[in-house]
Image (tube, rainbow, N blue to C red):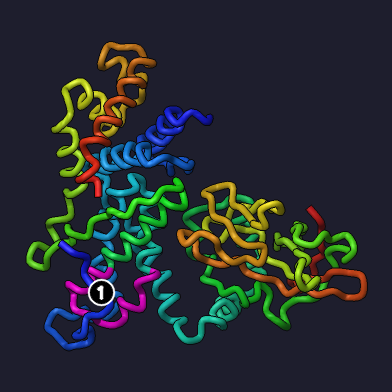
Amino acid sequence: MTDPGERISAFVEALRKGQRPPRFPVESDDADVLRAAVALAAGRPGHGAPSSRFVSQLHHRLAEASGQAGEASSSRRRFLGRLGLPAVAALLGAAAATGLRAASDHWLPDTDADDQLVPAGQGAWIPVAPFGDLVAGQPRQFTAGPINAFVVRDPQTDDVYAVSAICTHLGCMLNANAAAGRLDCPCHGASFTLAGDPLSPIYPRALPRLRARINGDTVEVYAPTGVAADET
Amino acid sequence: MSIPRVDNAPDERAPTPALAANWESAYRENVDWVYRFVYGRVGNHLDAEDVTAEVFMRSLPRLRLAAPTAQLRAYLAMAARTVLVEHWRNGYDVELNDYSLTDVPQPQAWPDVRSDENARRASGLLARLPEHYRRVLELRFLQGCSLRETAAALRITIGNAKVLQHRALRRAAELGKQDLA
């Protein structure tokens, strides 16, 4: 569907159905057409107010962020501590399967890039791949129990690191885009660096990290206790 | 009207009777109009929620400063404009820097001025179109008709309804260039 007219039609149809419209590059004239469509769609009487669900979810997010000021790096650990690992693990798995929008704001706390998905003392090192099998800069996906993640061999340092493969926006499974050096979300266009840093300011939460290390010839990650890794 | 320079306002922390009590009340007082402002410029609730959330997350430090109400509104409007520009840049690879801040509601008009703002913009745009263009856009956007229903209502083929919609939107875009900001 490369014809601009068809794309604009799809954009209009999505607006009419109350769906998120598709993204595609446009010229300035076509952008004016999209904006006219947006203004008309938004003019439908009685449709402009935020839902109470959204208002309270955003309040919740702001409260979390507000309480974390000055101690942001420990926020995730505290959150995980409150819930307990099995609960978090189950939620992460469920989200990977369904990408439920309503649930996401509650169980995905704000994260910092240097924060860890599995806190020290609550997991174990498990092997995920032979180091020699990893190609520098090409993410290798694996699951370890409820955790779905990418392990990456850093082309500069030859060290390894691991980040969650679940988009922090709405919980969709990310795709590795090795050619572009990115992790891309197929749902709404969010993308992240291989290290998990957000590339779009619209979806600003970094991917949670897992600790990873090279042990002899094996790459290991720090995963919840009692799980084994599978490459996917 | 020039863009308010709220960042350099010298009386930022000066106590006035109109200070927001805390960030939560500042949020409650402003979330509705920010959302409606954003919704009028993205046209769907999923994007409106993402953009609005981003606006408030970025503005949280300002929300916590107990700024005078009018300054906070100007700040939020500027943040909304910034995130909207990014929304169009990231999603559509286009630079749109004309999201006007001139219609940030004045304190005395608050909060009624916002509630039908989007409907007013849409009807203002439709009113300037020729009848056949206005009709197809009313059916499609305001009444939410499918192309098939629109074609039936206008007694034309679906293909022609699609072409008519396209031409009508182009005309609306030309007419609306100024007031879509």
> Magenta stretch: residue A48 in it?
no
In the figure, B102 relative to A59: above or below? above
Is residue A225 visible to us here?
A: no
Residue A26 at x, y percent in the picture: 43, 40
Camera-side residue of B29 and B102: B102
Q: The residue marked by circle 1 belongs to what chain?
A: B
Residue B133's spot in the image, x, y percent? 23, 24
- Residue B60 shown in magenta: yes
Q: Residue at x 69, y 53 (%)?
A: A176
Query: Could you say where residue B129 lies in the image, as x and y percent from the top left?
Result: 17, 29
Seen as rendered, the residue at the extreme left is B108
Residue found 36% across the figure and 49% down from its top: B45
Q: Quadrant of residue B169?
A: top left
User: In this image, B12 relative to A82: left or right?
Assistant: left
Range of magenta residues: B57-75
**Quadrant into which the N terminus of chain B falls:** bottom left
Q: Which residue is mark 1?
A: B25
Q: Is residue B58 visible?
A: yes
Q: Is residue B128 left or right of residue B5?
A: left
Looking at the rendering, which quadrant does residue A141 occupy? bottom right
